[in-house]
Image (spheres, grey):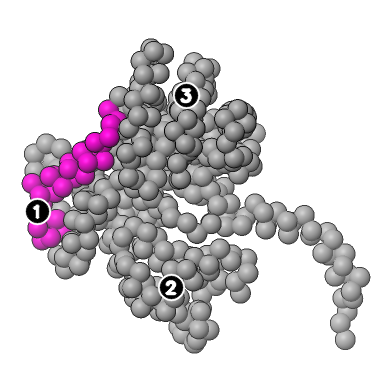
Amino acid sequence: MSSLGKDFLKQASKHLGEVDKTLADRYAGDFGGRQPIHTCYVPADKFSSRTIHEWGEHARNTLSSHAGTPAEFASVIGVAEGVVSDWWPRLQAKLTNEPIEDLRIDFEDGYGRRSDREEDEHVESALASIQSLTTAFSGFRMKSLEAVTRERALRTLDLFISGLAKQGGVPKNFVVTLPKVTFVEQVEVMVDACQELEHSLKLKAGTIRFEIQIETTQAIIGPSGKVAAAPMIDAANGRLTAFHYGTYDYSAAAGISAAYQTLDHPAADLAKSLLQVAAAGSGVRLSDGSTNIIPIGSKSEVHAAWANHYRLVRRSLERGFYQGWDLHGAQIPTRIAANFTFYREGLAAASQRLRTYLDKAESGTMDEPATALALAGYFLRGLDSGAITDAEMSELTGQSEVALRALVKRRGQIS
């Protein structure tokens, strides 16, 4: 006989009702769509209809000049020649067809302080060229909402979104980058501005989405001693797409000497780990920062920069940061290489574990439902990046892309 009757179960459900709603609403998990492997920042005064071509050309020329064979490139990044030979044709195709996945027109640090007239003109020129963009993702970075740049930031936001509305609307996968966010009130003002623009321009509610750059220590641990980034998710009211870590501003804010301001500094790892916990399950994605060590100069200098970049990108991937920033076209080969190697080398083991879980078969590994979701996400990210093909994924997992994306979306229903 059961000792806990229906009345107890009814009372328990009543007590946990709000918790159930929070889990279902706030922690619904990733939406299963594509995430770019990188964001490339281009100063607004340098952006043109040829930007994508120029970055791709930089990438291809640097690769052919400094590591034109799989063997040489493998030696630079420290992997076996056979590994590079496996995906070398895909790398060449990616550099030609999609060198940039996400482009951000920069009106902030990479652009600097200009007169209002000059920035207005660069907004207009950017709007004139943006229609020619072929990237899967795009957007612009405005200045921060701190007092010194607030008016200019909101003016650029207004002019850019208004210009897009006149051109027919905000493009798909278009995101505004809000930098140097310190307090939740800045997020609230950003939401208010988005709502006002949508109302004035007769855009659908929720059209304007933004990502937050974490570049201040107060955005990690606020005055109350709590992780300040967490309430920013709720304050964004569904508009927040990602947290982006800002390597150099954050490191400087933490008092780290310039020579040691890197993506793998312990202070950076602490900040990113806390961001990871705050965003987990919320659908808000994460992006690591950049390295300012650019592959230019002599062959030895290019090789050293490539080796460093490959190592940092690979490190980020292993830690669950599937996106980062690139500052120059010559960084793209190692960005792609790290992604291709990361996804392809684990295919056999991941496919076996996913098949075992879905088939409920006996194996030496007892995976939890959350791990099954992570395995499905692994294949989908590999597919989106170009590391694997749809045919390879179907053969390895026994599942189609549609089926795996449906699996990811059914978070909370997997058991």
Q: Secondary structure at mark 2?
A: loop
- Quarter residue 343 falls in: bottom left
**What residue did someone put label 1 on?**
68
- Residue behind mark 2: 400
| Crowding at mark 3 (Cα within 10 Å: few <14, some 14-19, many 20+) | some
Asked which secondary structure carries label 3, the reply is: helix
Distance CA(mark 2)–CA(mark 3): 43 Å
Amino acid type, label 2: Ser
| Residue pictured at 30% horizontal, 45% vertical | 100
Mark 2 or 3 closer to N-term?
Answer: 3
Q: Nearer the viewer, mark 3 or mark 1?
A: 3
| Disc on the earlier residue, 2 or 1 | 1
Q: Are marks 2 and 3 in contact (CB under 8 Å)?
A: no
What is the crowding at mark 1: few (fewer than 14 residues within 10 Å), some, or many (at least 20)? Answer: few
The type of residue carrying mark 3 is Leu
Mark identifier at residue 159: 3
Q: Position of residue 366 (x, y in %)?
A: 51, 78
Which mark is on residue 28?
none
On screen, residue 329 above or below 376? above
* Residue 265 seen from this side: no
Does 341 lie within the magenta span?
no
Viewer-nearest residue: 97 or 185: 97
Nearer-the-camera pick, 186 or 314: 186
Task: State which mark lies toward you, 2 or 3.
Answer: 3
Q: Tell whether position 48 is magenta.
A: yes
Q: Inspect the image, locate mark 1, and give the three-letter code of the amino acid beneath it.
A: Gly
- Of mark 3 and mark 1, the one earlier in the sequence is 1
Q: What kind of element bears circle 1? A: loop
Report how far apart the C-alphas of labels 2 and 1 lie in the structure: 35 Å
- Please state the extent of the stretch shown in magenta in the rendering: 46-75
